[in-house]
Amino acid sequence: MLRVGIIGLGAIGREHLEIYRHLHGVEITAVADFNLSLAAELATGIGCEAFGSAEALLAAGLVDAVSLCTPDHLHYADAVAVMDADVHLLLEKPISTDIVEADDLVARSEASNLVVMPGHTLRFETRYLKAKALVESGSIGPVIHGYVRRNNKVSVANRVNGRTSVTFFLGIHDIDALTWIAGEKVVAVQAFSSGQTTADGKQAAAIVANLRLAGGGIVALEAAWALPEGYPTDIDARLRLVGERGEVVIDVHDFGISTFSEKLSYPVPGAPIYGAPQGMLYEEIWAFVRAVRGEIAVPVTMRDAADAVRVAAAIDRSIESGGTETITY
């Protein structure tokens, strides 16, 4: 039986918890959150121990593996603590918002015998997997140009409350998906932010960036958390890559399903199948568990995740400098 803990019990942490509850051969033995009363409430419901910090959970020696779902700016310190405790780690994206920290996590993970896997969920979404296969097959040809976007509602920015930039919170999904699907690294960026800010005034409401790929192609990236609360979907995302022989397009703004009662809505699919969760996060967590068991190789590496951090950091630097930023690996 694999003993698992969840550190950080916000929205994404609670999704991890619910998925682990349905995995065969997995037992949730501990949860942790700075809001100890929340951790205790959830722990009571599943019959495990509750802690008020990552350090306390790890010191108890109750887990073989953890999902680390704390806010972005806490990822580095918490991830180091997990690896120092000799515990396998599924680390939510981004692995850090700092390049030096990201590289240190790569070095620590590669020097260990642990499974340390970053949580880039789009690599487990069927449409993105198909796009990857099409590009790899050569049917699209080398990428000439493209476009990726990810927009969220204003309430997401309010919840994040200035703890990270829209580039790292949203854009990093598509940075990783782009480079993975295209099979090329980003070598230069030029980016701009909107004059409008989030409600707290701490972050730009939107950014756009032009990305140059190593093979010469160019891709525009858009990331924003400015959609009004009445917008019919929580996520408006798109990917389009045009190659020498064709193109691939993914459009998930409406998920292929719509409802209308008091207003139009595009609900995110993923209803449980006969009581069990499904979807890309389920597939990501199941892959992590299988990697810990030695059944498969780790499908996403920390080096992949650090490369995405490099690009995101270059975008934010370009916004500050107003110039083009080159990226070295």
Image: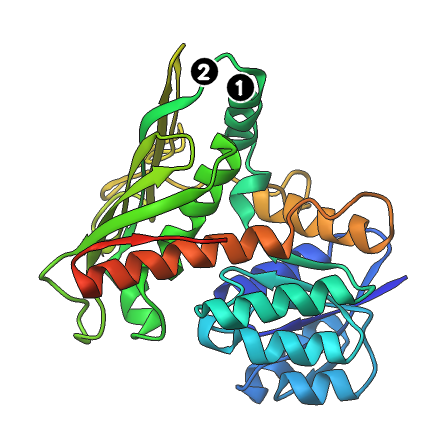
Q: Nearer the viewer, residue 71 or 297?
A: 297
Front residue of 51/186: it is: 186
Q: Position of residue 297 (x, y in %)?
A: 78, 45
Question: Is label 2 in a helix, a strand or a loop?
Answer: loop
Disc nearer the start of the sequence (2/1): 1
* Residue 130 vs residue 314, the one in the foreground: 314
Which residue appears farthest toward the left when viewing the image?
195
Q: Mark 2 points at which residue?
A: 140
Mark 2 vs 1: CB contact within 8 A: yes
Q: Where is the N terminus found, in terms of image quarters?
A: bottom right
Q: Give left or right: position of 234 versus 9.
A: left
SS at badge 1: helix
- Mark 1 — residue? 134
**Residue visible at 19% across and 67% down in the picture:** 198
Q: Residue 33, can we see it?
A: yes
The Cα atoms of the two marked residues, 2 and 1, are separated by 7 Å
* Percent position of residue 43, x then y: 69, 77
